Amino acid sequence: MSSETTVTLHKAPRTTVGQNQGKFRTYFNFPGRNLPDHHDHGYGPLSTVVESFMDPDTLIRMHPHQNEEIISWVPRGVMRHDDGEGNKLVTDSDHLMVMNAGREFWHEEKTLPEDPPLRMLQIFVRPHSLDLPPNIQHEPIEEPVQNEWRQLFGPEGSDAPLFVRNDVHFSDIRLDEGATVSLPAKEGWDTYFYVFDGAVTAAETRFDTTESGLVVEGADSVSLTATTDSLVVAFVINPEAPVTRQGTIGR
């Protein structure tokens, strides 16, 4: 990285905000909280990144969502989805699900007794407009390539395999110990990353499992180096995108 490059990187430790419902446990990461004196828990259209754990034989009963885009990224275990439209879907490390809840979408989640323990991220994106038509996307995703970013969703009209209705791109990467990669970036946009497993350094700062960073200046010059085998996700965000703030959970 050039000494002339200005980088503004804000680190957040593991969140202390969570809910323990026994067999279902959630931890809420708020990207806006990375930024000092930022009066919004979200950052532009990215509202909340929820780390969720479900034990085998767990049911989250049918419930509604409105005015939020909910992405289920499942690298560990199996999440089973039923909804009011008659879909019965299984999301795992080979599939990604996006619920474009819009004006209203009902669903339930469960694991079976024979399923492995589930650890996943549920990502809440604020749509650009209220009461959009509800929609669900559930697609197989490409096999990951070690030490390369894999793009998984993006704004409508982008080349990502699934879409959300606002300006957020999402990618994941599996890094070998010692590997270095550039952080995803786009001119005029900012980048938020979350260490799901392992540990990395960025701009001479260490990030351990469940810690996150927000780069609001110079993201195109920031590299991640894995200090151990790691799994990291990154969001490239347009902080000036118009957003709604009436989601059931994300807001």
Image: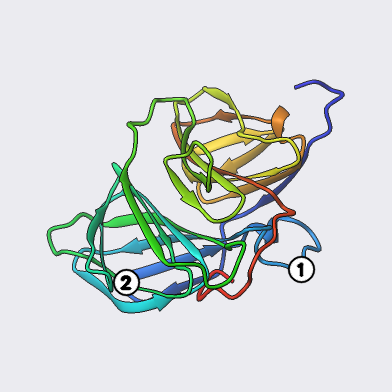
Quarter of the image for residue 185 reads top right
Left or right, residue 167 beside residue 62: right
In this picture the colour scheme is rainbow
Q: Nearer the viewer, residue 76 or 157?
A: 157
Return the x and y of residue 130 as percentages of the image width and height: 58, 71
Return the x and y of residue 97 as percentages of the image width and height: 36, 53
Label 1 – label 2 distance at C-alpha: 31 Å
What is the secondary structure assignment of the residue under circle 1?
A: loop
Quarter of the image for residue 17 reads bottom right
Q: Amino acid at mark 1?
A: His
On the image, numbered disc 2 is attached to which residue? 107
Return the x and y of residue 150 as percentages of the image width and height: 45, 33
Residues packed near mark 1 inside 10 Å, few (<14), some (14 to 19) or many (20 plus): few
Q: Is 169 rendered above or below residue 1?
A: below
Q: Residue at x 72, y 52 (%)?
A: 239
Q: Residue at x 30, y 64 (%)?
A: 54
Q: Nearer the viewer, residue 232 or 46?
A: 46
Task: Give the mark nearest the N terminus, 1 or 2.
Answer: 1
On the image, numbered disc 1 is attached to which residue? 39
Quarter of the figure with the C terminus: bottom right
